[in-house]
Every structure is written in C-alpha cells, then in structure tokens.
Image (tube, rainbow, N blue to C red):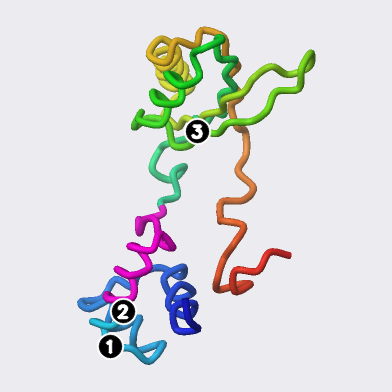
Amino acid sequence: MDPTDLALLAELEKGIPAVEEPFAAIGQRIGLSGAEVLERVQRLRDDGVIRKIRARINQRLVGITANALVAWRVPAGGEERAIAYFSSSPGISHCYHRRPVPGRWEYTLYTVHHGRSRAGVLAAVAEAARGAGCPDYLVLFSTEEFKRVPNVRIGENRGDLP
C-alpha cells in the first residue's frame, strides 16, 4: 500500500457518493481518474485489504429493533459443527470464539442476531440451537447502541491504533 491507497481508503470510508460516476468523483478528490480508482479498489480487494463494500443502514430506522448477543456452551466435540452452522447462517451477523473462564463462565462461542421483534429473534436462536447442536445458550438483548464504527478508521487515524 502507498499513500494514495490510504487516501483512497479514507475516501471510501466516507461513503460512495450518489452521483452518476461515483468513482470518478472519488478520484477527483485524490487526483485519480475513475478507472484508476476502480483498478486500485480491485487490487486492494484482491490483496484482502478491502473485504466488502456495502451499504450501512441505520437498522433501527428500518424496524430492526431486537438485537441480541447469544453466548453458546458448545457440547464436547461439537465446536466444528457449531462454527460451520453459525458462520453460514444468513440470520447471524457475527460469530466469535472466546476462551471460557473455568468455573465462572463456560460459554465459548458468541453470535449476534438481529430482528424486528424479540419473539422473532428468540425463534431464530432456537432454530440455530437445533441446527448447530447447541441446546445450552444465553440470549442477551441490547437495550441501547453506543458505537457502530470500526476501531481502525483510515480517515481518522491513518490506521494507527492509539
């Protein structure tokens, strides 16, 4: 990556403008043509720097108000099956693995679920429990959202962690 790549990533973080030629508009701000922007974006994607380009929606404004973190206690020998199921499930936005705290907190997998109602999320979690073979879980619904941006933002800190 070079300084132009960093400038491009900072512009992409701001969002893609809703204009007829958005990549040309981005390029104009950093001294590139639209074609050069697309070439760099493709290279950064091929290199794994850019994983996805997607819309970011305010989910609460579109009616997705039931959000839950689910902690899973996976049966012995069932972790591979559970991870495969959770990771491929379209209703699960995140899947994390954490070490347990023996004797205090035995949950090792965590998933994040979103829905229009608590009942809908609970039904989806029950279905995930059956599909993953994990009957022991704890559902923690969120009550308020405090932050929804990545920790590393090129435009704010050039990718350096504090």
Judge whether residue 128 is colored magenta: no
> Which of disc 3 and disc 1 is earlier in sequence?
1
Mark 2 element type: helix
User: What's the distance in space between the residues labelled 2 and 1, CA to CA?
Assistant: 6 Å
Q: Which residue is mark 2?
A: 37
Residue 154: x, y in percent? 55, 71
* x 60%, y 43%: residue: 145
Residue 97 or residue 33, whichever sits in front: 97
**Amino acid type indicated by mark 1:** Ser
Residue 73 or residue 11, whichever sits in front: 73
Residue 61: x, y in percent? 43, 45
**Amino acid type indicated by mark 3:** Cys
Residue 75 or residue 134, whichever sits in front: 75
Give the magenta range: 38-56
Q: Which residue is mark 3?
A: 95
Q: Which residue is mark 1?
A: 33
**Residue 131 sits above or below residue 53 on the image:** above
Q: Residue furthest bottom?
A: 31
Which mark, by number, is residue 145? none
> Which of disc 3 and disc 2 is earlier in sequence?
2
Residue 141: x, y in percent? 58, 26
Quarter of the figure that contains the C terminus: bottom right
Find out whether the residues at labels 2 and 1 contact each other: C-beta distance under 8 Å.
yes
Residue 34 or residue 25, whichever sits in front: 34
User: What's the distance in space between the residues labelled 1 and 3, CA to CA?
Assistant: 38 Å
**Residue 25 sits above or below residue 129 on the image:** below
